[in-house]
Image: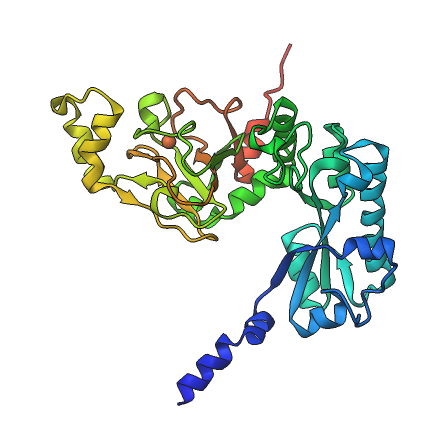
Amino acid sequence: MTTTSTNSAANDPLSIHRRAIIVDMHADTTQRLVDEGVDLDRRLADGHLDAVRAKEGGLDAQFFSIWVEPELFGLGGARAMKRADLQIEAVRALAAKHPETWELATTAADIRRISSAGKIAALMGLEGGYAIDEKIENVGRYYQMGVRYMSAAWSVSTSWAGSSGDAVGQTRGLNDFGRAVIREMNEEPWTRLAYFNTARRALEVLVGNELAMQLRINLSIQLPNDDSSLLPVHADVWAGDSPYEVVLWIPYVNVYGTKTMYILPREKDSRYQERMGELKLKSAEELYRTIEPDLRWLDIPYGNVLLFTQNVMHGNIVNREPETRWSSNCRFKSVFSPYADKKLGEFFEPILVRPATSIGASYRLPSVA
Ligand SMILES: [Fe+2]
């Protein structure tokens, strides 16, 4: 009896909310701050969000959506920017007016600190890239103003990114400028660090305490039934990668069935790789059929990451599930392990070095004339 009642108390949603750090990724309340001048510090009779109800529900951090409605403010231009700026000012004003309740946050560490002080962290995300007004420098501008995520398009496509909400988006993906925007966001210094931190301890144990990380984080999008970007069975070492590299694979959705990737467990992989010559395979398809009975299909729930050596065979097939797979991958290796085609300074960059290494690397012998 005791166990049952303890369990039900432990599983009670409110009790979970109280124990965990609860982050709500999206509130459309920002427009109310601007248009209606509501005071979010008081209990409101309408809407979904105010500080009183947020605290009752155990909310620790709120991302405020900075949303520029394209029908009213355009797909870019001064009016779109003004609309975004006003909303950012309103979120900042909320924190400035009620510092005992709200505090502006831009990092995970901020959220932990603010939550342990019993306050609510206020964060901001741009919902749709209209306010960057097709200018790459505005990505950094909004970052400087405290914005910490941006989606490419809301339900109306921009010139550079197709939306799932209109007809244009059926055929438009990202153009060159769109890719430049994603690159710019990736170049924010915290992006690679945040990526690294998701598996830092495992990387330090498995790879080393002086680590090089790939300069670019790769994003992979696998639409249902799309065969345009498949990775047939391969080991990256066959294409010139160093065998000392590991891949940190982060799925942004649950991956399962055909929506995931497969990998050949290492013991089985070595047996196939030893017999590769005698198997006399003519294509990747034949190789796939040969190893298929031994493949492991990775069922990874959202929130978990995969670290694997790309020396073992892996790949994916057409995603036959009804949902899109979004995932990122990035390579790591010990700074001083051998390099192959992908060099330090071009493809890899040190992300973790010990003080003695930094001192040594920056030391220049005095020239004696
Ligand atoms: Fe690969």
Residue 78: give x, y in percent of width and height.
Answer: 85, 33
Q: Residue at x 38, y 26 (%)?
A: 338
Choose top left, top right, bottom left or bottom right for residue 339.
top left
Residue at the far left: name it: 278
Is residue 292 found left or right of 123 in the rendered image? left
Q: Residue at x 36, y 21 (%)?
A: 240
Residue 259: give x, y in percent of width and height.
Answer: 39, 43
Q: Residue at x 69, y 32 (%)?
A: 158
- Give the image's coloring scheme: rainbow
Q: Tally the numbered discs.
A: 0
Residue 33: give x, y in percent of width and height.
Answer: 83, 57
Residue at the far bottom: name it: 1
Q: Nearer the viewer, residue 365 or 245?
A: 245
Judge whether residue 334 can be spotted in this image.
yes
Q: Nearer the viewer, residue 312 or 79?
A: 79
Choose top left, top right, bottom left or bottom right for residue 312.
top left
Q: Nearer the viewer, residue 85 or 147?
A: 85
Is residue 232 found left or right of 109 in the rendered image? left
